[in-house]
Amino acid sequence: MDKIRSLINTHQQRSTDSIEDEPILLDEKNISTKKDWEDHKDDPVEREEVMKSIDEILFSGDIDPSFKLLQELPEKETDLIALEEKRRQMRLQHYFVGRKLTDELLNKKGEFNTELDRVIELEQDLQKTFAVTLDIRFSVKQAKLGLTDGAITLLGYYSQRQRLIALLNTLKTIKILHKTDERLRELIDKEDFPGAIQLCRDCQHAAVTYRQYTCIQDLNSKLKDTAVLIEEKLDVVLSVMCINFDHERYSKITTAYLLLGKLQSAMDQLHMHFTSAIHSRTYETVYRYASNTSADQKIQYEDLCRFVPPDLYIECLSNILTTLWGIMTSYQKMLSYHYSDSSCADKLSQFDKNYVQQKLQLGLARIWQDVQHKVNPYLVSQDLSQFQFDDFIKVLDLVNRLIQVGEEFCGTPNIPCDLLREPLRAQSVQYFRRYHASRTEELYMFLNMELWELLPVKPTFTTIQLNEFRFMASKKNDKKKLSEKGDGYFSDKTTSPFMFADIGVMEESFFDFQEDSDSDVDEELKQDFVEDGATETDKGNKRKKMTSKVTFHNSSRDGPILTNTTLNVLRYLGKYMLMMDSLKPIAFDVLLSMSQLFEYYMYAVYMFFGSTNVESSNPRLAQILLKIQSSIILGEEPRPNGINIPAPQVSDLINLHDTQNLFGLKERLIATESLVFLASQFDLWKEYLDNQIPADKLNFLNQFYNQTLPLSRELREAVYSGVASKAMSYNAILQLMGNVKWEIRELMSEPNSYVYVMLQEMEAMQQKISVVSTFVPIPVEVYQMIWTLSISELCRVFLEGFGSARKCTHEGRAWMQLDFQQFIVQVVKFITIKPIPGKDVVENFIKAYYLTEGDLEQWLRENYMSYSSKQLNSIINCTTAQFSKMMQRSRLSGIVDELIKKS
């Protein structure tokens, strides 16, 4: 160490002295003194420039630097000063390089000393090792000199014994190898493939070790055959996993393929097995149901589907889907296995894990496509339009459930399923058109036979209690059960979603709801047709109870007002909504048909009971009714591509001309209020329909809700006006008013006799209404509407009677006012509506008699729309007569005629 350190110091001193002591020959441009040299060598700028001027090739180690520098000298002689300058530059470069090396060594002096200590320590260890080696060699030499002949003989015997032991072990190994074949087959039968593979490999390695023996050559051939057998058995069991996945068995299979180094090829083969399982198992299922086929016949799957009898079609479809669901479940469990933290998965490399997971993920779409390809031919093999409605809905539910299973299987909604939807869409359109035409024919028949008798139901009745609507509660129940399970369609606890008990239209899936709601449903409502509730004896007994007290409808006590026809329409709508839920592509067509059923029912109610002047009283209602007539009612020429329903005809058993029953008030009330109830049910279905209808068709739905349904209430006026316009003897009363002399000269204290006739007519009408209410509780708003329309008619009679007066004195006008006030006092006994309809118009008319000549013209211009020309001229005649101004009378009559023409 001291030598190295002194060497460094000596090198540093020599480098400095060699430059400082060397005589430097410079020209006048260079520094020539030692002091200048000291300044020159410590200049950092020049040091950097000198270091950059050194050619990098001198440090490469591939050439001799001295030889390289000599080669750079000019071949011809040159002056000594130039050579000396070249020499000075090289020495300066040498100085700065040495200086930098010294600085680097001094900077790392501590590390240098540490490493030098290790070198010294290593040198000491080598010296010790050398001494031990010498001792060993000496001992070996002494041992060789001390051996005797007996010892050498003993060693020879021992060596022979060891060789014989080795031979015995070899014979034992060969014997074990020959018995291994039986053990291998035993492991294969137990499906312990990893153990069989490992044992086979060990035997093969041993066979290679003892291949010099003839018996081993035959054994090696058997082991190769056994290895092939193991792979064949592995493939068979792998195919079984596609149908009935078992976690433990599959784990052994995966480990076995991993030992063979064929896991990736096994994944490729696995998808072929799944495809084969789908094809073979589906064919076997259909073959069990096919008729007129023999075992020897080789029939294509598409043709085989046509041999399934129609009565077994749904059962066969259910079993097909159950079989396919089982295969898809095995695939899902296999996928979950490779994503789990199983022991086998831990043995896989990251590359193998990624490969297997990616392969299985890509296979999801392929498996789903294969499933669709097997279901599609079966769906098109039968004409579903000939099925009963419930059977057809079962088919739709099964296929829709398969689509839901496919969405969960692929892990994404809106998966491609055209192979399932398209054949159902085509058949559904055909089926629904035939079904809708049949239902409209039934509705036409029901309406023509309908006697409009009240169908008694409990106050808690709702449409959801009808069998046709239970699918809505069943659907919620299915989702609830599925959410409680929390594992979807592919859980170990999940049974087949395609067995009959799990289909949405089946009663078992609705069991929980049924227990809660059946107690509130009338037994009659569970029948397809309900008989009228009241017998003729009951009706006669009720008629005997003549009382003026009206029984009003109470929603908490009385059920909704329904008829047989209403109930059938509700059932139709429930079935339509069920089909809408089952097949979304035709949802709008179903909605359109639902609107047609409601519109036809409303059209029939109007045609049976509505007034003929609806165009003037309610133009919007008249427009909708005209649209219904032009779009669905059968005309002189049938529509080639539309619905054609004959115009309904009211039953001959319904009497709408009898004054005793108020011109069929009971029938009118039941018909109109059943229509209102039917419209109210659509409000309950609004959210459901919004979710079923495509977004681009929602405008039609909103138009139906905003324009058509509200007309059910507006139709009340058109129907009940038929009662109000004929309920009292208006013409007789008007005739009595025409006999009154209004040109009296004294004030009267008693009203005219026609007022008492009016009141008697009103009381008689009230009694008739009360009789009707014993059969049908009358809603308060209906009662108020009937009296509103009737009082409006009486006010019209007042106007007509007062307007017929040719002459009238001030006392006569007071008498008019007394008659009307007496009428108004009695009206409040029948209605609570304020203001009383028509009251202001009549009072305004009477007050016009008191107007001065100058105010009369202004009144005529402001009120001419409220009165007829005859009534206005009556006021003119009576008012101007007292002033005996014929010209004024003619002028005012001309103004009236002009105003009426403009209106």
Image: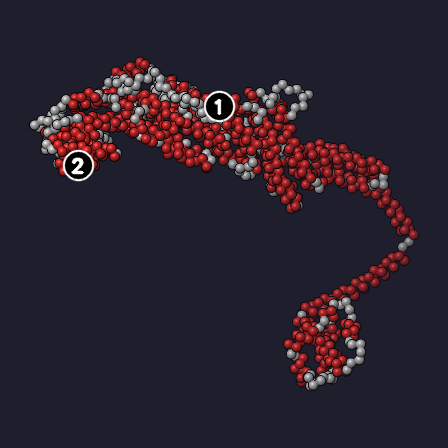
Tag 2: amino acid: Glu
> Which residue lies at the image location 60% right of the left edge and 21% below the top edge?
307
Question: Residue 594 lies in what quarter of the image?
Answer: top left
Disc 1 marks which residue? 434
The residue closer to the viewer here, 177 or 714, is: 714
Left or right, residue 826 beside residue 197: left
Q: Quadrant of the N terminus?
A: bottom right
Q: Crowdedness of circle 2 by 10 Å Cα count: few (<14), some, many (20+)?
A: some
> Which residue lies at the image location 39% right of the left edge and 21% below the top edge?
647
The residue closer to the viewer here, 190 or 894, is: 894
Question: Residue 794 lies in what quarter of the image?
Answer: top left
Q: CA distance from mark 1 to mark 2?
A: 67 Å
Disc 2 marks which residue? 857
Q: Identify whether 550 is placed above or below 117.
A: above
> Which residue lies at the image location 25% right of the left edge and 27% below the top edge?
789
> Which residue lies at the image location 26% right of the left edge and 34% below the top edge?
903
Left or right, residue 481 beside residue 783: right
Could you say where residue 768 lies in the image, as x and y percent from the top left? 25, 20
Could you say where residue 330 lies in the image, as x and y percent from the top left? 61, 34
State which mark lies toward you, 1 or 2: 2
The residue closer to the viewer here, 71 or 518, is: 71
Could you say where residue 655 lies in the image, as x and y percent from the top left? 31, 17
Q: Secondary structure at mark 1?
A: helix
| Any part of residue 829 in sight | no
